[in-house]
Image (spheres, grey):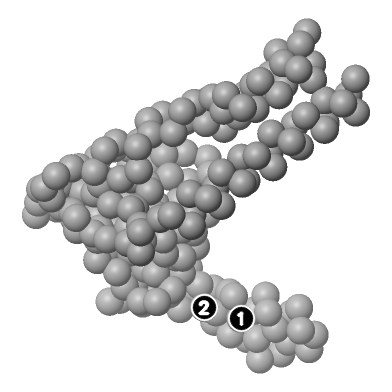
Amino acid sequence: MYRQGSRLLMRATAADGARLRVTAGSRPASQAFSTEVTEAPAVDSSFLEAWKKAAPNIDPPKTPLAFMKPRPPTPSSIPSKLTLNFVLPYQSEISNKEVDMAIIPATTGQMGVLPGHVATIAELKPGVLSVHEGNEVTKYFVSSGFAFIHANSYADIVAVEAVSLDRIDPSLVQKGLADFTQKLNSAVTDLEKAEAQVGVEVHSALNAALTG
């Protein structure tokens, strides 16, 4: 039964692929952003039909779509605020907060994000994330991560580690920079050099953030 079920599922997948190829061939040159596409159905009907034929007594598994909230639509006009989410692996720093601007330390350089920014994915480097809200500016030092800017004036920033600048001890940064510089100069193996180089780059960025 399971061998027959796998054939049915593969058949359904192949049919979906054929439909996608036909659709892709008929698309116009200018494609819509993901936020402008109509919301996808939460359940793939062809998959459910194939599943019922293959395993009628077993409930079908849930797909990631079943757990996703509908994406906010792209507004017809540019909103006055940027909706920001800033999360770490262990906590959420900012959740659905409306701000004026965010300045992101991307690997390509400092990137200012305002409402109406073009949809972009940017890799983060060690540096300062600045969140501007009126006359208030909140600064975080981020180690690495990604920023996802959506066409509907939403921005999601995911960092591996981050700390508010006012919690950083400048003397410890100077000591760490000196220690890793010494380790880099005395490193013998490639691993020792790589680890020391990362330490120098992070502490140099921390030092620049505090003195800049």
Q: Residue furthest bottom?
A: 185
For this view, does 118 lie left or right of residue 193? left
For this view, does 139 lie left or right of residue 198? left
Closer-to-camera residue (117/205): 117
Identified by mark 1, the residue type is Gln
Q: Position of residue 206 (x, y in %)?
A: 42, 71
Asked if residue 118 is positioned above or below residue 195 in the image, the reply reads above
Label 1 residue SS: helix
Label 2 residue SS: helix
- Between the residue at mark 1 and the residue at mark 2, the CA separation in whole angstroms equals 6 Å
Disc assigned to residue 201: 2
Disc assigned to residue 62: none
For this view, does 157 lie left or right of residue 98? right
Asked if residue 15 is positioned above or below residue 121 in the image, the reply reads above
Q: What residue is rendered at 49% in x and 26% in y?
A: 42
For this view, does 112 lie left or right of residue 209? left
Q: Which quarter of the image is occupied by the N terminus?
A: top right
Asked which quadrant contains residue 128, the reply is: bottom left
Q: Position of residue 55 (x, y in %)?
A: 79, 16
Q: What residue is rendered at 78% in x and 8% in y?
A: 57
Asked if residue 111 is positioned above or below residue 62 in the image, the reply reads below
Q: What residue is rendered at 65% in x and 86% in y?
A: 184
Tag 1 residue = 197
Q: Which quarter of the image is occupied by the C terminus?
A: bottom left
Q: Position of residue 148 (x, y in %)?
A: 39, 54
Q: Residues within 10 Å of mark 1 (few under 14, many from 20)?
A: some
Q: What residue is rendered at 57% in x and 32% in y?
A: 64
Q: Position of residue 80 (x, y in %)?
A: 10, 48
Q: Are marks 1 and 2 in contact (CB under 8 Å)?
A: yes
Identified by mark 2, the residue type is Glu
Q: Residues within 10 Å of mark 2 (few under 14, many from 20)?
A: some
